[in-house]
Image (tube, rainbow, N blue to C red):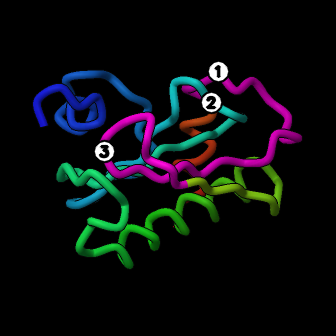
């Protein structure tokens, strides 16, 4: 979609702090994080709603993979996820550690490395 910010991030037209990428999905740090390590997970192809993504099981496996990495990276069991979809008209899943996690939520380079180094 031409004016979709997430499509522009997927295409590399807007910079992002990527934590995970495969052929179908991209996970990157949210620019306005709820907590350190707040990640947006999007399909690379434009779909309006999460429920429109044909391989939704794979989508949620990516969310699970990121959440498990966040648990290790931020030493917490409490990882939140949120699906609303009204802020940006591109399917996306928020995955983020609870707000009690210590650290600078705007230290994108550090939080990116912490998550990436804990992906399995």
From the viewer's perspective, is the residue at label 2 or at label 1 nearer? 2
Q: Which residue is mark 1?
A: 106
Q: Is residue 98 magenta?
A: yes
Mark 3 burial class by Cα count in 10 Å: few <14, some 14-19, many 20+? many
Q: How many marks?
A: 3
Q: For the residues marked 2 and 1, what is the alpha-carbon distance in whole angstroms?
A: 7 Å
Between residues 83 and 30, which one lies in front from this camera angle? 83
Q: Secondary structure at mark 2?
A: loop
The residue at which mark 2 appears reads as 33
- What is the residue that sits farthest to the bottom in this orientation? 57
Q: Which residues are magenta?
A: 83-110
User: Is tag 2's residue or tag 1's residue first in the polypeptide sequence?
Assistant: 2
Q: CA distance from mark 3 to mark 1?
A: 24 Å
**Residue at x 22%, y 51% (from the top left corner):** 44
The secondary element bearing badge 1 is classed as loop
Query: For the residue labelled by badge 3, is the local secondary structure a helix, a strand or a loop?
Result: loop
Q: Are marks 3 and 2 in contact (CB under 8 Å)?
A: no
Q: Which residue is mark 3?
A: 90
Q: Is residue 64 magenta?
A: no
Find residue 54 and report its horizontal and vertical position in percent: 23, 73
Asked whether 89 or 106 is in front, the reply is: 89
């Amino acid at each position: 979609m031409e004016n979709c910010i997430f499509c522009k991030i997927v295409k590399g037209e807007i910079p992002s702090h990527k934590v995970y990428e495969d052929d179908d999905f991209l996970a990157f740090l949210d620019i306005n994080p709820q907590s350190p390590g707040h990640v947006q997970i999007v399909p690379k192809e434009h779909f309006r709603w999460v429920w429109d993504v044909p391989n939704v099981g794979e989508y949620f496996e990516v969310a699970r993979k990121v959440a498990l990495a966040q648990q290790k990276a931020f030493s917490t069991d409490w990882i939140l996820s949120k699906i609303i979809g009204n802020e940006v008209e591109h399917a996306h899943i928020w995955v983020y550690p609870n707000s009690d996690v210590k650290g600078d939520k705007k230290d994108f380079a550090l939080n990116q490395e912490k998550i990436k180094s804990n992906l399995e």
